[in-house]
Image: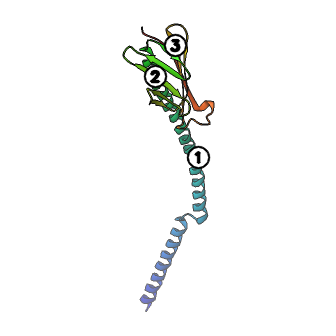
């Protein structure tokens, strides 16, 4: 009987030791509390909100900037195209938004249509989105060509910063 009591006492001691070990393990292996998790999520939300604002602002700048760059390139190409026609002319006369480029073979009329914001060649649209077009005579064979191109598709109600202006000087080749 003594052996049985000793044995039972030993089992109780072992069980108590195991319970103490489990309890001490639970005390040292604390997890995160609900308050800590909520605090971490709120800080993360604030940081994400700050970076989202910066990224959105960056994309808002890129769109108009690329649109302006594209309009500048198109204005340069359009100006070169008009200058090429004008350089080959025998005579250029400006009559009410009309530039008549009289080549040896045929007469070509380059006209600025104010209502439709286009430049036409012999009645067909050559260049669109033009707010202003002008050719000024400097001397007998030298002219200044000025183009103001709209950045937006619609040239109505524009401010000065919505236009791209390009100029070039040409000499007629006789």
Q: Is residue 104 at all visible to an observer of this figure?
A: yes
Q: Secondary structure at mark 3?
A: strand
Q: Nearer the viewer, residue 29 or 124?
A: 124
Q: Examine the image and state in which quarter residue 11 appears.
A: bottom left
103 with respect to 53 (left or right): left
Identify the residue under disc 1.
Answer: 53
Q: Mark 2 packing: few (<14 Cα in 10 Å), some, or many (20+)? A: some
Query: From mark 3 to mark 2, how far is it between C-alphas?
Result: 17 Å
Q: Secondary structure at mark 2?
A: strand
Q: Nearer the viewer, mark 2 or mark 1?
A: 2
Identify the residue under disc 2.
Answer: 109
Q: Secondary structure at mark 1?
A: helix
Earlier-in-chain disc, 3 versus 1: 1
Query: From mark 2 to mark 1, how far is it between C-alphas?
Result: 52 Å
Residue 77: percent from left, percent from top: 45, 25
Q: Nearer the viewer, residue 172 or 35?
A: 172
Q: Is residue 169 at all visible to an observer of this figure?
A: no
Q: Nearer the viewer, mark 3 or mark 1?
A: 3
Q: Examine the image and state in which quarter residue 58 appears.
A: top right
Residue 1: percent from left, percent from top: 43, 92
Query: From mark 3 to mark 1, how far is it between C-alphas?
Result: 50 Å
Compared to residue 36, the image places residue 78 above or below, namely: above
Q: Mark 1 packing: few (<14 Cα in 10 Å), some, or many (20+)? A: few
Compared to residue 123, the image places residue 88 above or below, namely: above
Earlier-in-chain disc, 3 versus 2: 2
Identify the residue under disc 3.
Answer: 143
């Amino acid at each position: 009987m003594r052996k049985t009591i000793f044995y039972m006492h030993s089992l109780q001691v072992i069980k108590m030791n195991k319970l103490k070990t489990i309890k001490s393990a639970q005390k040292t292996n604390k997890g995160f509390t609900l308050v800590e998790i909520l605090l971490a999520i709120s800080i993360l939300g604030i940081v994400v909100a700050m970076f989202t604002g910066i990224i959105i602002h960056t994309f808002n700048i890129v769109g108009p900037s690329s649109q302006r760059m594209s309009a500048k390139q198109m204005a340069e190409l359009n100006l070169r195209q008009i200058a090429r026609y004008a350089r080959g002319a025998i005579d250029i006369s400006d009559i009410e938004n009309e530039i008549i480029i009289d080549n040896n073979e045929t007469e070509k009329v380059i006209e600025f249509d104010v209502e439709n914001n286009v430049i036409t060649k012999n009645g067909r649209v050559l260049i669109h989105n033009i707010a202003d077009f002008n050719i000024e005579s400097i001397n007998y064979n030298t002219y200044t060509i000025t183009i103001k191109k709209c950045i937006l598709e619609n040239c109505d109600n524009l401010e000065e910063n919505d236009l791209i202006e390009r100029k070039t000087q040409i000499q007629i080749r006789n």
